[in-house]
């Protein structure tokens, strides 16, 4: 029996990776393409896998309390046009000074990050951070 739901809670399951995520979503949901809310919090996920980008209708994504350690992987989620709420706190990436700026910059449609509203001032700061970081990267590649 499949559930007529657009949300799926897979939190607190010791999930290590997301390789079988699509198979799991297809198994449980009557309309897997309509998945809008996914809770993967408090697992052992260490990477933001590209498979998440296949969930085109995703609006809310909980990834807090995992082991994600590469901040740039947040950029992948920019492929999700409807994503407006994400949690990433409680991961190693949270210790990076650019954590919130990077998240807001990569996901400009966000309304909340880590259960906290994204303010207009944060959007401006994230844009400044992004432009500054882009210049630094382009200068480095010119010197190489």
Image (cartoon, grey):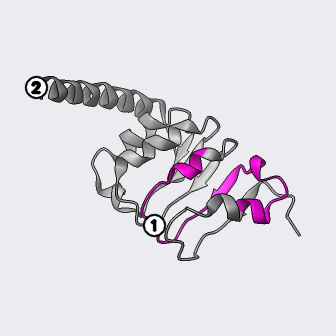
Query: Disc 1 versus disc 2: distance between alpha carbons?
Result: 37 Å
Q: Position of residue 49 (x, y in %)?
A: 50, 54
Mark 2 — residue?
143
Task: Judge left or right: residue 112 versus residue 131.
Answer: right
User: Which quadrant, please, contains the N terminus?
Assistant: bottom right
Residue 5 is tagged as none
In this rendering, position of residue 34 left or right of residue 141: right
Q: Is residue 78 magenta?
A: no
Report crowding for label 2: few under 14, some 14 to 19, many 20 or more residues within 10 A (C-alpha).
Answer: few
Position above or below: 59 against 144: below
Q: Position of residue 48 (x, y in %)?
A: 47, 54
Camera-side mark, 1 or 2:
2
- In the image, 39: left or right of 113? right
114 and 63: which is toward the camera: 63
Q: Secondary structure at mark 2?
A: helix
Which quadrant is home to the C terminus? top left
Q: Provide the residue designation for mark 1.
A: 66
Nearest the camera: 120 or 47?
Answer: 47
Q: Residues within 10 Å of mark 1 (few under 14, many from 20)?
A: many
Q: Does the magenta segment cover residue 47?
A: yes
Residue under the image location 33 percent in, 30 percent down: 130
> In which quarter of the view is residue 80 placed?
top right
- Location of residue 35 in the rendering, given as x and y in whole percent from the top left corner: 73, 51
Residue drawn 50% across the image and 66% down it: 17
């Amino acid at each position: 029996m499949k559930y007529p739901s657009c949300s799926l809670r897979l939190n607190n399951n010791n999930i290590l990776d997301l390789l079988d995520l699509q198979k799991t979503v297809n198994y449980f949901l009557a309309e897997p393409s309509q998945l809008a809310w996914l809770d993967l919090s408090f697992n052992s996920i260490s990477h933001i896998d590209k498979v998440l980008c296949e969930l085109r209708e995703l609006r809310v994504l909980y990834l807090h309390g995992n082991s994600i350690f590469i901040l740039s992987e947040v950029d992948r989620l920019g492929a999700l046009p409807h994503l407006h709420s994400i949690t990433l706190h409680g991961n190693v990436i949270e210790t990076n000074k650019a954590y919130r700026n990077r998240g807001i910059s990569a996901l400009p449609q966000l309304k909340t990050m880590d259960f906290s509203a994204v303010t207009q001032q944060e959007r401006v700061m994230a844009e400044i951070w992004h432009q500054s970081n882009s210049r630094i990267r382009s200068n480095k590649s010119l010197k190489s």
